Image (spheres, grey):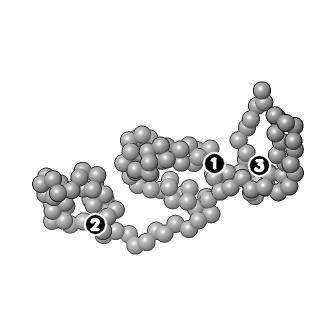
């Protein structure tokens, strides 16, 4: 059959976004010409696309992404933010979370030990992901 290559999102010469101008159907030999967008995902590098695939396969659960890729929580967040920006969106960085006091940490661990929260909830609370 035909070799099919991924659509480059950026021009290798100037770095600007590429536009698809021709589509071809090998089954019925139809060609359509015009200006077509490859979408925001085409703006991502191959490495970023691979990360997105892992993220989706892990159903967006950062703890699973950490395990799958063997990287830390801050690295997962950093890569997500890079991808969000590469797709043309703004990242809401918000205020940096305050350090959790040892008393607050103990309260979360006590809640976990008592079975009132799950281990995932405890991890998110300790990381400052939940209010």
Q: Nearer the viewer, mark 1 or mark 3?
A: 1
Q: Is residue 24 left or right of residue 4?
A: right
Report the residue marked by disc 2: 99
Report if residue 109 is visible in the image.
no
Give me the C-alpha separation between circle 2 and circle 3: 44 Å
Indicate the secondary structure of the residue bearing disc 1: loop
Residue at figure coordinates x 63%, y 52% from the top left? 41
Neighbour tally class for label 1: few under 14, some 14-19, many 20 plus, Cα within 10 Å: some
Q: Nearer the viewer, residue 110 or 127?
A: 110
Question: Who's the residue at 65% across and 56% down the image?
Answer: 40
29 displayed left or right of 40: right
Q: Residue, x 40% and y 73% (percent of image)?
A: 95
Residue lying furthest top in this view? 1
Is residue 13 left or right of 128 when viewed as pictured?
Answer: right
**Residues at marks 1 and 3, CA–CA distance in whole angstroms:** 12 Å
Determine which residue is flagged by label 1: 45
Disc 1 and disc 3 in contact, CB within 8 angstroms:
no
Residue furthest to the front in view is 28
Residue 5 placement (x, y as % from top left)? 73, 37
- Give x and y (percent) for residue 68: 42, 40
- Inter-mark Cα distance, 2 to 1: 34 Å
- Sequence-wise, the earlier of marks 2 and 1 is 1
Dot 2 or dot 3, earlier in sequence: 3
Disc marking residue 86: none
As helix, strand or loop, the secondary structure at mark 3 comes to loop
The circle on residue 12 is 3
Q: Quadrant of the N terminus?
A: top right
């Amino acid at each position: 059959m035909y070799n099919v290559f991924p659509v480059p999102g950026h021009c290798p010469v100037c770095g600007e976004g590429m536009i698809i101008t021709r589509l071809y159907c090998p089954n019925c030999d139809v060609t359509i010409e015009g200006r077509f967008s490859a979408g925001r995902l085409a703006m991502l590098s191959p490495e970023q696309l691979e990360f997105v695939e892992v993220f989706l396969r892990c159903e967006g659960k950062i703890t699973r992404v950490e395990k799958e890729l063997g990287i830390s929580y801050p690295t997962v967040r950093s890569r997500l933010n890079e991808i969000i920006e590469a797709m043309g969106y703004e990242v809401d960085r918000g205020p940096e979370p305050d350090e959790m006091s040892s008393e607050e940490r103990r309260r979360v661990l006590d809640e976990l030990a008592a079975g009132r929260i799950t281990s995932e909830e405890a991890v998110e609370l300790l990381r400052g992901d939940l209010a």
